[in-house]
Amino acid sequence: MDAFTHGLASYSITRALFPRASWGTVTAAILAGSAANIDSISAAVSPSAFLNWHRTATHSVVGTLVLIVVFAIGVALATRRKAKPESFRKILLAVLAACVLHVAMDVTQNESVQLLWPFRAQRYSANWVAHFDLWILVILLAGALLPQLLALVTEEIGAKSKAPRGRIGALIALLAVFGYIGARSVLHGNTVAMMEARTYRGELPRRVAAFAESDSPFHWRGLVETERAFYDLDLSVAPGSSFNPDAAVVSYKPESSAPLDAARTTVSVRRFLEVAKFPKASVEKISTGYRVQLRDLAEQREGRSGPHVIAIVESDANAKVLSDELAWDKQM
């Protein structure tokens, strides 16, 4: 998710679990709970670096443990000379809660996370929530701000509360977010089942996926793969809505060919296929031979702005590979 949402989520879980934590501990938890997104700077290096590091190391179990230890020790050392320093246990648990919540929220998204890096290349994503979800942001923002506003009103009329400010609001916001994501998981299952039960121009689906859109929990984007084609669907599961498979945007797969077979053997394509959810190849005749490009159809309408990687392979007229690379997709 976006950094602002992660920051609010980290603040909320720290306030909910440790309402009397110092602002130093709260600040550390917010920074630690957002730190995993530092892997986005890999986009400034190269497409290959982005594919290797984005949502891998810092979003893995190993990387999360490293972040927890680094931030907890850093805060403990920075505050050890204070008159009443925070206990290391409280700092460690606050940072732990924020970092684990970050990864848990990212796993519910459309973008995949390599949880078991560096031991396994497999990626995980539930596809319940878009990269940016306005409803989650509003819930967390309300949970953070409303208690502060109510406290100001209470102090204005002369009443003072000794209870830690913000805990109830943070708890309610977190429970509301968890309930919202749970509801989206049910809608996701219904959407997938609806697509699996249909045929597409006479073909049965081989693979089906539903990806969350950011505007409404009832709005989903569907992708269906059959033997000959990919079907891109704009879906609504709101009460009274209908589903027409014939309204899908169809992308036909290229015929099997020597240039395509040669491209599959390259390092760039193999690395791309480890990450892509719905890879779609295109084969183009050029002056020197052939150009094969692979794109991930799952990214084409993902609500995440930013770079998207494609694989490009060029071969001669006899399908001998001349070059292969990972590049930025200039069409997106």
Image (cartoon, rainbow, N blue to C red):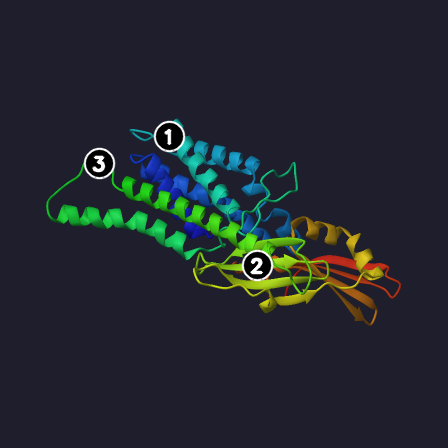
Q: Nearer the viewer, mark 2 or mark 1?
A: 2
The tag earlier along the polypeptide, 3 or 2, is 3
- Could you tell me which secondary element the residue under label 3 belongs to? loop
Amino acid carrying label 1: it is Lys
Residue that badge 3 annotates? 163
Residue that badge 1 annotates? 90
Residue 278, image quadrant: bottom right
Given residues 9 and 66, the one toward you in this image is 9
**Apparent side of residue 183 relative to residue 85 in the rendered image (left or right):** right
Amino acid carrying label 3: it is Ala
The tag earlier along the polypeptide, 2 or 1, is 1
Residue 308 at least partly seen = no
Which residue lies at the image location 59% right of the left edge and 51% below the top edge? Answer: 42
Q: Quadrant of the C terminus?
A: bottom right
Q: CA distance from mark 2 to mark 1?
A: 44 Å
Other residues around mark 1 within 10 Å, as few (<14) / some (14–19) / many (≥20): some
- Could you tell me which secondary element the residue under label 2 belongs to? strand
Check if mark 3's residue and mark 2's residue have beta carbons within 8 Å: no
Residue 75, image quadrant: top left
**Residue 330 locus on image (x, y percent):** 63, 66
Query: What number is the disc on residue 222?
Result: 2
- Residue lying farthest to the left in this orientation: 158
Which residue lies at the image location 31% right of the left edge and 48% below the top edge? Answer: 143
Q: Nearer the viewer, mark 1 or mark 3?
A: 3
- Could you tell me which secondary element the residue under label 1 belongs to? helix
The tag earlier along the polypeptide, 1 or 3, is 1
**Residue 140 locus on image (x, y percent):** 36, 49
